Image (cartoon, helix red, strand yellow):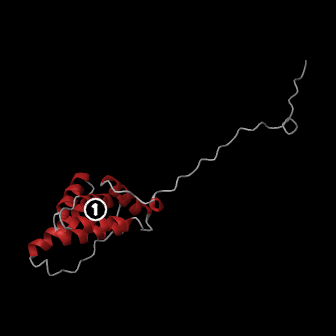
Amino acid sequence: MESGKRKISGREKDEASIQLLEKLQEQLRSSNASIRRRAAFNLSWMQEDGLDILKGILFGDYQVTTKNAAAYGLRKMQGRMKKMALEVLKQGLTQHNSATAEICRNALQLLGHKIPAEYLPKKRVAKKSRIREIPRKTRPRRTIGTR
């Protein structure tokens, strides 16, 4: 899963900030859950740049654990970015990738938002199976031989 190079926007003028964003994006794909969460939290404080990175990871072709960390970062967005992060999570409900939709659904539930019924998982009704008796005619008869 390649990260791909992002276009540098006007907000990212400083070379140090570019390196920091790349470092946090790399840490978001770490195998250590603590490092992933910390990177997602740090990205949540980085306004538009953090939102772009978290959104790209949530909708991209990444592992479920990485997507979970991105959803955590979106949940932790503060201030004016909170509304935009909620919109990203609501967009995730319509994704064809079932893992992304489930992650976004869980994140919205953790934030206390009501999930529309059309985005809730379908409950599968278990088909009850009865134990049937096999008719006597089709069963082979066992004869007990006498000596």
Q: Please state which of residues 38 and 26 is positioned toward the viewer in this rendering.
A: 38
The C terminus lies in which quarter of the figure? top right
- Relative placement, left or right, of 70 versus 39 is right
The residue shown at (42%, 68%) is 95
**Residue 60: percent from left, percent from top:** 34, 69
Identify the amino acid type marked 1: Ala
Identify the image quadrant of residue 44.
bottom left
Residue 130, compared with residue 145, is above or below; it is below
The residue that label 1 is drawn on is 70
- Residue drawn at x 28%, y 71% is 3
Q: Dot 1: what SS? A: helix
Location of residue 78 by image quarter: bottom left
Q: Quarter of the image holding residue 133?
A: top right
Q: Position of residue 117 (x, y in %)?
A: 46, 59
Provide residue 144's location: percent of width, then percent of height. 87, 23
**Residue at left offset 33%, top offset 68%:** 1
